[in-house]
Image (tube, rainbow, N blue to C red):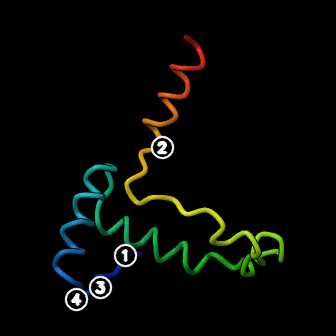
């Protein structure tokens, strides 16, 4: 049974959420319901990070403007020429 809920959210967040919902062909209500359900239903324990993985954090500095798709495309073009 559906029940109405009133929320107060940042206007920018609302507008971006509407665009996201429209792009994914889902209603904003369904999107929020799905998100809340995933929070509630996620009963798995927190993922433990192994010491090895923890030691690797911060080892690589990735530029913010990295275009990995373009770089990978360039790599493939060069490889198969």
Quadrant location of residue 8? Answer: bottom left
Looking at the rendered image, the disc whose residue lies closer to the viewer, 1 or 4, is 4
Query: Residue 48 vs residue 80: left or right?
Result: right
Looking at the rendered image, the disc whose residue lies closer to the viewer, 4 or 3, is 4
* Marked residue nearer the N-terminal end (3 or 2): 3
Q: Which residue is denoted by mark 4 in the rendering?
A: 8
Query: Residue 3 vs residue 74: left or right?
Result: left
Looking at the rendered image, the disc whose residue lies closer to the viewer, 1 or 2, is 2
* Marked residue nearer the N-terminal end (4 or 2): 4
Looking at the rendered image, the disc whose residue lies closer to the viewer, 3 or 2, is 2
Looking at the rendered image, the disc whose residue lies closer to the viewer, 4 or 2, is 2
Secondary element under disc 2, as helix, strand or loop, is helix
Q: Residue at x 72, y 81 (%)?
A: 46
Q: Which residue is denoted by mark 1 in the rendering?
A: 2
Q: Which residue is denoted by mark 3 in the rendering?
A: 5
Secondary element under disc 3, as helix, strand or loop, is loop
Q: CA distance from mark 3 to mark 1?
A: 10 Å
Looking at the rendered image, the disc whose residue lies closer to the viewer, 3 or 1, is 3
Q: Residue at x 55, y 72 (%)?
A: 38
Q: How far across and how far down the image is residue 71, in percent?
A: 48, 37
Depicted 80 relative to depicted 13: above or below: above
Q: Residue at x 22, y 73 (%)?
A: 14
| Quadrant into which the N terminus falls | bottom left
Of 50 and 76, which appears nearest the observer? 76
Depicted 61 relative to depicted 65: above or below: below
* Marked residue nearer the N-terminal end (1 or 2): 1
Q: Residue furthest top?
A: 81
Q: How far across and how far down the image is residue 23, in percent?
A: 28, 49
Of 11 and 5, which appears nearest the observer? 11
Q: CA distance from mark 3 to mark 2?
A: 41 Å
Q: Which residue is denoted by mark 2 in the rendering?
A: 68
Q: How far across and how far down the image is residue 67, in percent?
A: 41, 45
């Amino acid at each position: 049974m559906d029940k109405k809920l009133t929320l107060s959210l940042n206007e920018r967040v609302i507008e971006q959420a509407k665009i996201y919902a429209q792009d994914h062909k889902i209603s904003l209500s369904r999107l929020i319901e799905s998100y809340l359900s995933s929070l509630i239903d996620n009963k798995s324990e927190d993922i433990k990070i192994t010491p090895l993985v923890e030691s690797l954090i911060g080892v690589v500095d990735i530029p913010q403007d990295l275009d990995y798709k373009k770089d990978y495309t360039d790599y493939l073009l060069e490889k198969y020429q």
